[in-house]
Image (cartoon, rainbow, N blue to C red):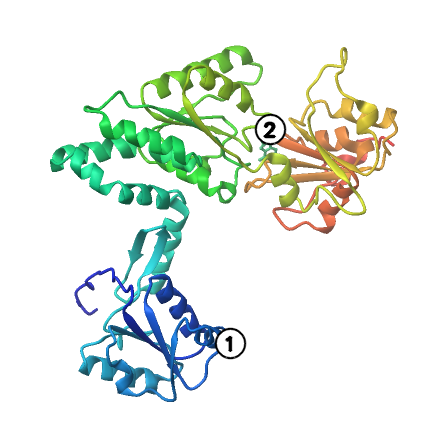
């Protein structure tokens, strides 16, 4: 292994400076675009140009040199990029540039390059540049993707705000120590969150307040109500991931998978607030409200993490009402709800031009006495019903739907542990629904999809084991087929 020292990182101000690009193909075009974004005066030299580059020349946006590379093309040039597919020409450019003390980048050739272009993540004027010194570009790319996922889009606006206010900040806090403390207050305060929520005016006002404040005020906590998705951590949103990365405290339901929790900041405090089956829901919910308020009041960044989407059978609305009543800042990050996720992972399109014109999200809970369910409406054909909490009450669902006219051979797919490694799908027809679920001992969490589209669970199966049918259950011959 060579022990060559790391490259020296620099950010170039190319505004108005002449930069030569040798080559007229698609690689050259990408370089030209990036250089123009940075304000460079681009000159392209090549025997032939692809149409997009030719258009820039025609419009007078860039200058053109015709023919094969000539060292005189480097006159008055600050930087040259060789982007041809000929090693001979690329080498000639590098050699001529070296002789004239012009920095040269040869695309995809670290050895010939005196300057390398890093992998980078951009958020407005804020840039993170990554280099492996040309030795491990794949590693640099991998890190770039990580940063891309983790850095919120609004960081660009934050950088812009700070740049605009730089003079004022220095005037207000001339002492470097005091200035650092100010930035600490600003960056851990509400301004970044306000920008994330798209409230530029609020951010500006809060900036003014923080700028004028003398000492550290009591820190203001906030709550992000985040949907964790159905279990597969790949289904968490980027915003959800970022919130988990910043959280001081995470209040999560039992439904949230361990893989998702593993993405949280290492030193975040994890508190499980899941409801116990048969437990006192009212007491549990009251405790959740109290914890949310207590931690936010103490100035912490709280993530309230819920399975699926927080606004779908998740009591997210009630929790926000409490926060609103207490004047606590909040934001909401949606998640992939179980019906959407289970349908996708079971190969069942929820709507279909021929088989289903609408889809309803319902819960299977409910008592028979004062039944609030509009069964006649649900029994209509060509619509998809997605029942949450669908392990108990299957008999009631079948009996009512059939009684109100839904065909007994309407297909269903019952998805247990959807999107997770343990996913199981039980498929069949409405008439067999409770028996099939019992025969395969389906347990929570499970979601029931009922409707013409559910027939696709077998045909379009792609994830996990193949769908189970009533006949597949051990001893199924003894189970009578309800028809
Ligand atoms: N807010 C959640 C729903 C909470 S209600 C969401 O948007 O998904 C809890 C019910 O969701 C469970 O009883 C089950 O019906 C369904 N559910 C959640 N995750 C599931 C999963 N991975 N597989 C199957 N069903 C799931």
Where does the image place residue 187, in percent across and percent down from the top left?
28, 35
Residue 280 appears in the picture as rendered: no
Q: Earlier in the sequence, mark 2 or mark 1?
A: 1
Q: Is residue 270 above or below residue 64?
A: above
Q: Which of the image's four quarters has the N terminus?
A: bottom left
Q: What residue would you read off at disc 2? A: 312
Check disc 1 and report its element: helix, strand or loop. helix
Distance between the alpha carbons at the discs numbered 2 and 1: 50 Å
Looking at the image, residue 343 sits to the left or right of residue 265; the answer is right
Taking the spot 45% from the left edge, 14% from the top edge, the residue there is 287
Taking the spot 65% from the left edge, 37% from the top edge, the residue there is 415
Looking at the image, residue 235 sits to the left or right of residue 482; the answer is left
Looking at the image, residue 426 sits to the left or right of residue 66; the answer is right
Check disc 2 and report its element: helix, strand or loop. loop
Q: What residue would you read off at disc 1? A: 51
- Examine the image and state in which quarter residue 28 appears: bottom left
Q: Is residue 232 above or below residue 405?
A: below
Where does the image place residue 142, in percent across and percent down from the top left?
37, 56
């Amino acid at each position: 292994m060579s022990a060559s020292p790391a490259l020296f990182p620099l950010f170039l101000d190319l505004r108005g400076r002449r930069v030569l690009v040798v080559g007229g193909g698609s690689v050259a075009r990408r370089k030209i675009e990036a250089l123009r974004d940075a304000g460079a005066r681009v000159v392209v030299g090549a025997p032939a140009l692809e149409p997009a580059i030719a258009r820039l020349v025609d419009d007078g946006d860039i200058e053109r040199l015709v023919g094969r590379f000539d060292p005189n093309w480097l006159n008055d040039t600050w930087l040259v990029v060789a982007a041809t597919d000929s090693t001979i020409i690329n080498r000639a450019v590098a050699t001529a540039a070296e002789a004239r003390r012009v920095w040269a980048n040869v695309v995809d050739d670290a050895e010939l390059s005196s300057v390398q272009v890093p992998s980078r993540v951009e958020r407005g004027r804020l840039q993170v540049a990554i280099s492996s010194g040309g030795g491990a570009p794949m590693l640099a790319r991998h890190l770039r993707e990580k940063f891309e996922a983790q850095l919120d889009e609004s960081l660009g606006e934050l950088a812009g705000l700070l740049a605009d206010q730089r003079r004022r900040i220095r005037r207000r806090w001339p002492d470097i120590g005091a200035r650092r403390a100010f930035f600490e207050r600003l960056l851990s305060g509400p301004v970044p969150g306000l920008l994330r929520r798209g409230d530029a005016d609020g951010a500006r006002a809060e900036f003014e307040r923080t700028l004028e404040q003398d000492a550290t005020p009591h820190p203001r906590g906030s709550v992000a109500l985040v949907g964790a998705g159905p279990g597969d951590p790949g289904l968490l949103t980027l915003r959800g991931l970022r919130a988990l990365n910043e959280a001081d405290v995470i209040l999560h339901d039992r439904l949230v998978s361990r893989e998702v929790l593993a993405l949280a900041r290492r030193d975040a405090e994890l508190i499980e607030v899941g409801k116990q089956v048969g437990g006192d829901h009212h007491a549990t919910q009251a405790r959740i409200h109290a914890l949310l308020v207590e931690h936010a009041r103490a100035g912490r960044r709280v993530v309230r993490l819920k399975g699926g989407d927080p606004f779908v059978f998740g009591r997210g609305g009630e929790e926000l009402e409490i926060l609103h009543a207490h004047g606590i800042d909040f934001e909401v990050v949606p998640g992939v709800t179980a019906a959407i996720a289970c349908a996708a992972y079971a190969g069942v399109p929820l709507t279909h031009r021929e088989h289903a014109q609408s889809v309803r999200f319902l819960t299977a809970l409910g008592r028979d006495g004062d039944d609030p369910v509009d069964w006649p409406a649900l029994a209509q054909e060509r619509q998809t019903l997605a029942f949450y909490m669908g392990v108990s009450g299957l008999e009631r669902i079948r009996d009512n739907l059939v009684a109100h006219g839904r065909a007994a051979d309407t297909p269903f797919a019952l998805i247990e542990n959807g999107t997770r490694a343990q996913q199981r799908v039980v498929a069949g027809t409405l008439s067999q629904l409770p028996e099939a679920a019992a025969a395969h001992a389906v347990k929570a969490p499970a979601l029931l999809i009922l409707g013409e589209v559910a027939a696709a669970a077998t045909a379009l199966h792609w994830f996990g084991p193949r769908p189970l049918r009533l006949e597949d259950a051990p001893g199924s011959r003894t189970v009578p087929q309800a028809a």
